[in-house]
């Protein structure tokens, strides 16, 4: 099967050919956007790969879950919020040394509940250019899309 486009290669390593042992891991990711356009970034907790890097909240799909179900579960588990409508937005394949991941980015404009950092992560409401660092390689395309939405052509972070 051909890929829709070449994966983004993180960390400058050579992209590996997708052998039978290199499975794609599907990840549901939420871009929570406030009415003023600010979006939520969270830092990856200690103990996970890329600990301390900033990303959009989300996580891997469990067996039998849709992207929307996985994202609603992850946002509740990680942030304690209940999501309203989840809008599928874009997909990105990222080739990390640790895994080949397909990120299913969704826009979330509607949620209820106060944010709770249930995994002791940090959070920051951001706008372009992003002030927190470092950002996870897989989040950079999203910053490009968000910048394009507002006609921003300057630095992203
Ligand atoms: N949540 C999230 N993950 C991202 C983003 N960008 C990006 O490349 N990733 C990658 C990092 C990881 O390889 C993968 C997400 O896996 P994870 O370890 O956070 O998932 P999880 O919460 O289900 O983890 P676990 O329970 O298995 O520890 O997707 C992003 O913006 N948000």
Image (cartoon, rainbow, N blue to C red):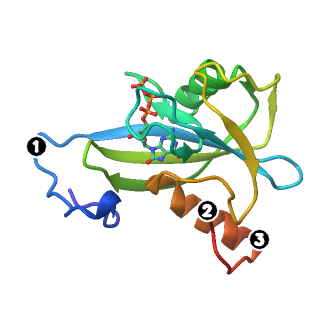
Residue with the most extreme right position: 36
Q: CA distance from mark 3 to mark 2?
A: 11 Å
Tell whether label 2 touches label 3 (CB within 8 Å): no
Q: Left or right: 50 with respect to 116? A: left
Q: Name which residue lies at 68% across and 59% down.
A: 130
How crowded pointer 2 is (Cα within 10 Å; few <14, some 14-19, many 20+) is rated as some
Q: How many marks?
A: 3
Instruction: Tell me the quarter of the picture where residue 60 sits.
Output: top left
Residue at the spot of label 1 = 20
Tell which of 155 and 111 is nearer to you: 155
Q: Position of residue 71 (x, y in %)?
A: 57, 31
Q: Name which residue lies at 61% across and 62% down.
A: 143
Q: Left or right: 11 with respect to 154? A: left
Q: Position of residue 45 (x, y in %)?
A: 51, 29
Q: Does mark 1's beta carbon lie closer than 8 Å to ligand 1?
A: no
Image quadrant, ligand 1 = top left
Which of marks 1 and 3 precedes in the sequence?
1
Residue at the spot of label 2 = 143
How crowded pointer 3 is (Cα within 10 Å; few <14, some 14-19, many 20+) is rated as few
Quadrant (top left/top right/bottom left/bottom right) for the N terminus: bottom left
């Amino acid at each position: 099967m051909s890929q829709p486009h070449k994966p983004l290669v993180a960390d400058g390593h050579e992209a590996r050919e997708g052998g039978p042992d290199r499975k794609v891991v599907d990840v549901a990711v939420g871009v929570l956007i406030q009415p003023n356009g600010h979006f939520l970034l969270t830092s990856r907790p200690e103990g996970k790969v890329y600990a301390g890097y900033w990303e959009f909240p989300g996580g891997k799909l469990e067996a039998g879950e849709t992207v929307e179900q996985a994202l609603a579960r992850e946002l509740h588990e990680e942030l304690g919020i209940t999501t309203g409508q989840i809008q599928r937005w874009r997909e990105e394949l990222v080739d990390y040394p640790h895994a080949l991941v397909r990120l299913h980015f969704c826009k979330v404009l509607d949620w209820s509940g106060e944010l709770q950092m249930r995994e002791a992560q940090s959070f920051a409401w951001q706008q372009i250019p992003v002030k927190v660092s470092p950002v996870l390689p897989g989040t950079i395309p999203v910053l490009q899309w968000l910048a394009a939405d507002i006609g921003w052509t300057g630095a992203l972070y």
